[in-house]
Amino acid sequence: MKTPVSFDALELTGRTRRHVLEIDTPRGVVHRAVVKPLRAMRRAAAKEGIDLALASSFRDFDTQVRIWNEKWTGRRGLQDRAGRALEAASLRPAQRVAAILAWSAPPGASRHHWGTDVDVFDRAALPQGYQLALIPSEYAPGGPFAALTAWLDANMHRFGFYRPYRIDRGGVAPEPWHLSHAPTAREASRRLRLATVRSAIGDASIEGRAALLQALPRVYARYVRSVDAPPRR
């Protein structure tokens, strides 16, 4: 009998790795329930000349804190929803929170904590010397990963995957590279609560923590809960 997938608070917020496995093909770290369907999808894509690779997979809490802090301080590039560069120092705290959230989840609230979500690209289509940017134009017609987009549109659902950020709902900007394993992520999403995220943030060394905590109820509703629904079973 198959063991049902479950998540506790530490797993939901990326403060443990006990729910994930490190794999070589494709190279990354994913939830143990995602390994088999991900590999099956990769094998199917390979038959069409696509080398499905992971740009990002499981991301722990501390890594999400580092990304957040680097964007808050300007050490990492900050962009608006249209992809235009922003100067972090010129933004008020609430504006800086909103700018970061367009492309990055707050620590404790990233779907990457669950190990169910991955950012994908086609290694075979990567031009020599090209620096992967994970921007929508790379996956649009004329971009290097247009063929990958078309293949995923036609096939990813067979393996249980879908795009949680397919359309702009006013929260996270559309991310055509971001795939979620619906059967597993559905359970994590069901269990994640605002209080769980608030507790994870707690006294963590997060830049702009006061501004983030003040906005957290709105952030949770707009950026965490407002995602595309997985396809029906």
Image (cartoon, helix red, strand yellow):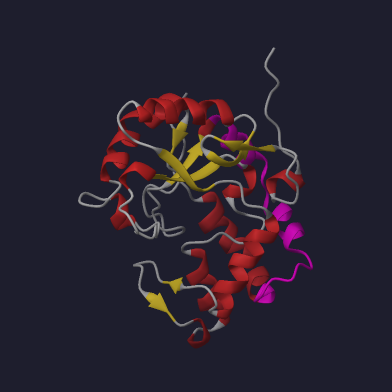
Residue 98: give x, y in percent of width and height.
Answer: 50, 70
- Rendered image quadrant of residue 150: top left
- Relative to residue 191, is residue 82 drawn left or right? left
Q: Which residue shows up at 73% across the image and 63% down it?
A: 201
Up-down relation of residue 92 to residue 215 (above or below): below
Residue 9 lies in the magenta stretch: no
Q: Is residue 165 above or below residue 52?
A: below
The image position of residue 177, as x and y in percent, is: 40, 48
Q: Is residue 232 visible in the rendered structure shown here?
A: no
133 vs 113, left or right, is: left
Q: Is 44 in front, or is 180?
A: 44
Residue depicted at 39% across the width and 66% down the height? 81
* Depth check, front residue: 61 or 191: 61
Q: What is the chief secondary structure element of the magenta stretch?
A: helix
Number of marks = 0
Q: Residue 32 at what x, y percent from top left? A: 65, 31
Q: Quick check: is 186 in the magenta stretch?
A: yes
The part of the chain drawn in magenta is: 183-210
> Relative to 213, is 171 above or below?
above
Q: Give the quadrant of the N terminus.
A: top right
